Image: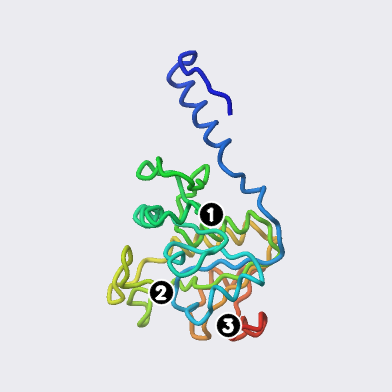
């Protein structure tokens, strides 16, 4: 990209040019590989019996936040500042795809991919949105539990009690925004068939059950479809 003499522009003009050049350097979402199946992994405990490694041969894997500690998804999405700082400190983004929203706290960190404009959503729904932009025929959603443990009272996350996460004894996180964002993605991509994979006794919100392009299947049925142990 050729160098620009910013002295030839007003402050507002240069600001606009700088933003346009930054966007131009960002990898374009539409340029990524289009295949038939993707898996989007949230970190609810319902996916605990599924080994992420076993999914790679069946499709593209999108993961969130601390998943990188144990598995390298094809795309890692994190929007929490503390989580991005942890990821970047490890250098993970130098070898793998990491996507996040622009933030001044890590604007100078190299090799992060930024959403333009910022989604302003939680990591799970953002990961689902990114996968949907890649136009798969079917997307399987795992670990999107929404409701807390212990009858909805306790924090529901595989990485509870680890750095940058709440304690397992802490109260459940409000899931209304996650649910609304998930619903919006599915509604906006009617050409994609989504499957929410959960335990038989998991929470099934009516907001999702009413969507024509979403089906709910159990963990056991999911394992049978892909012959997983």
Query: Which of the two marks, 3 or 2, is nearer to us in this view?
Result: 2
Residue 182 on image: x %, y %:
53, 62
Query: Which of the two marks, 3 or 1, is nearer to us in this view?
Result: 1
Local packing at callout 2 (Cα closer than 10 Å; few below 14, some 14-19, many 20+) is: some
**Quarter of the figure with residue 197:** bottom right
Between disc 3 and disc 1, whose residue precedes? 1
Residue 146 on image: x %, y %:
45, 71
How many numbered marks appear? 3
Residue 90 on image: x %, y %:
39, 57
Is the Cβ of the residue at disc 2 closer than 8 Å to that at disc 1? no
The relative height of residue 218 versus residue 59 in the rendered view (above or below) is: below
User: Which residue is denoted by mark 1 in the rendering?
Assistant: 97
Q: Residue at x 60, y 68 (%)?
A: 39
User: Which residue is denoted by mark 3 in the rendering?
Assistant: 218
**Quarter of the figure with residue 23:** top right
Q: Please, what secondary structure does the residue beneath circle 2 have?
A: loop
Local packing at callout 1 (Cα closer than 10 Å; few below 14, some 14-19, many 20+) is: some
143 or 113, which lies in front? 113
User: Which residue is denoted by mark 2 in the rendering?
Assistant: 158
Query: Which of the two marks, 2 or 1, is nearer to us in this view?
Result: 1
């Amino acid at each position: 990209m050729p160098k620009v003499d910013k002295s030839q522009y007003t402050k507002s003009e240069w600001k606009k040019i700088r933003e346009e050049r930054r966007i131009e350097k960002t990898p374009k979402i539409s340029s990524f590989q289009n295949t038939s199946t993707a898996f989007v992994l949230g970190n609810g405990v319902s996916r605990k019996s599924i080994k992420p490694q076993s999914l790679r041969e069946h499709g593209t894997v999108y993961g969130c936040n601390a998943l990188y500690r144990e598995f390298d998804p094809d795309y890692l999405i994190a929007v929490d500042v503390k989580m991005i700082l942890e990821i970047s400190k490890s250098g993970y983004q130098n070898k793998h795809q990491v996507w996040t929203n622009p933030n001044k706290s890590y604007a100078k960190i190299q090799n992060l991919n930024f959403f333009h404009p910022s989604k302003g959503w939680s990591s799970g729904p953002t990961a689902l949105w990114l996968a949907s932009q890649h136009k798969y025929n079917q997307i399987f959603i795992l670990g999107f539990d929404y409701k807390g443990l212990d009858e909805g009272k306790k924090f529901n996350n595989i990485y509870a009690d680890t750095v940058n996460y709440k304690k397992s004894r802490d109260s459940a996180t409000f899931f209304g925004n996650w649910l609304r964002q998930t619903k919006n993605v599915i509604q906006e991509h009617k050409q994609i068939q989504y499957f929410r994979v959960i335990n038989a006794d998991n929470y099934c919100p009516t907001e999702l059950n009413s969507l024509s392009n979403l089906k709910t299947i159990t963990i056991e049925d999911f394992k049978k479809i892909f012959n997983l142990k």
